Amino acid sequence: MAAIRMSEVTVWRWVAAEERRAVLLRDVDWTVESGEHWVVLGPNGAGKTTLVNLAAAVSHPSEGAVEVLGERLGAVDMRKLRESIGSLESGIARKIRGRYTGHEVVLTGATGSIALLHDRIGAEDRARADRLMDEIGVEALRERKFEDCSQGERQRLLLARSLMDEPDLLLLDEPTTGLDLPSRERLIASLDAMAEANADLPTVTVTHHLEEIPASTTHALLIRDGAIVAAGEIAPTLTSEAVSTTFDIEVQVAHNSGRWAAMVVRS
């Protein structure tokens, strides 16, 4: 069973002031299998958020078919389906109580809430939180208050939190946004550790920058103006030509020690 399967998907919205349809995605075919780790790359306005909202069972396509975890959108209880999808987004950090310790923040993921529901959390949940904090490398934050953590530390705690309810699919929407270089690299290292510890868990990471792609990434999707430029295994997909087309600027793509980078070609 594919984690995500999109077939001839188009998404549009009505622009009343101009009396026209604005196409956000156009004729998208995309499949994510178990154990694959995808990165979605594209400029602002390319359609990345629209694509992820479909994968997160948050919205429906205007045309075409979307299946998530074997369930077709439009023929399934979306709220129930979302219980099997983990996500990491910076907006969650603003909703978590600052006085919670790092361990308590991770524990809130056991109930999928932003509040710590003690009566619904058992010894097994606490043991899982301990294990995840060790895997992600945030055990040193166990007793630190969330409000006293740096932005990077908060993101790593939220990554551990997103794994608490054992999701079948994990979506990471620009997880390194706003992080300085050391914090970014620590988070990327945590993403690699997470991928190694959860071999069958499919993930989709959205970013603008090749430098933010974890070494564990197996596949890439490049998108521009709502249409896929290229998609497939990462090495043959992240070519200089494809990335240049995607971002409308001539770049040279480099790959070294599992990490990627793009440099503008100066004339």
Image (spheres, rainbow, N blue to C red):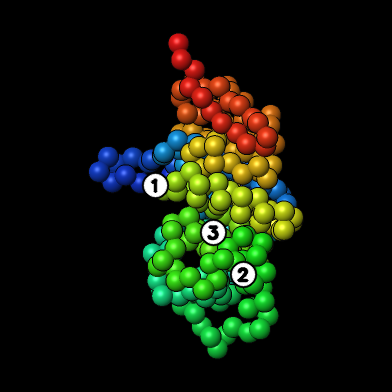
Which mark lies nearer to you, 1 or 3? 3
Callout 3 environment at 10 Å: few (<14), some (14 to 19), or many (20+)? many
Real-space Cα separation, disc 3 to disc 2, in angstroms:
13 Å
Which mark lies nearer to you, 1 or 2? 2
Badge 3 amino acid: Arg
Which residue is label 3 attached to? 156
Real-space Cα separation, disc 1 to disc 3, in angstroms:
35 Å
Which residue is label 1 attached to? 13
Q: Nearer the viewer, residue 4 or 86?
A: 86
Q: For the N terminus, which image quadrant? A: bottom right
Q: Earlier in the sequence, mark 3 or mark 2?
A: 3
Determine the residue positioned at 48% across, 70% down.
144
Q: Give the numbered dot on residue 239.
A: none
Which residue is label 2 attached to? 164
Is there CB contact under 8 Å for labels 3 and 2? no
Is there CB contact under 8 Å for labels 1 and 2? no
Badge 2 amino acid: Met
Badge 1 amino acid: Arg
Helix, strand or loop under label 1 = strand
Q: Earlier in the sequence, mark 1 or mark 2?
A: 1
In the picture as drawn, the residue positioned furthest to the bottom comes out as 119
Position of 126 relative to 36 (above/below): below
Is there CB contact under 8 Å for labels 1 and 3? no
Determine the residue positioned at 56% across, 66% down.
140
Position of 30 relative to 81 (above/below): above
Callout 2 environment at 10 Å: few (<14), some (14 to 19), or many (20+)? many
Question: Can see residue 111?
Answer: yes
Place of residue 47 in the rendered image (x, y in percent of width and height, measured from the top left)? 47, 42
Q: For the C terminus, which image quadrant? A: top left
Place of residue 97 in the rendered image (x, y in percent of width and height, measured from the top left)? 41, 73
Q: Nearer the viewer, residue 159 or 84?
A: 159
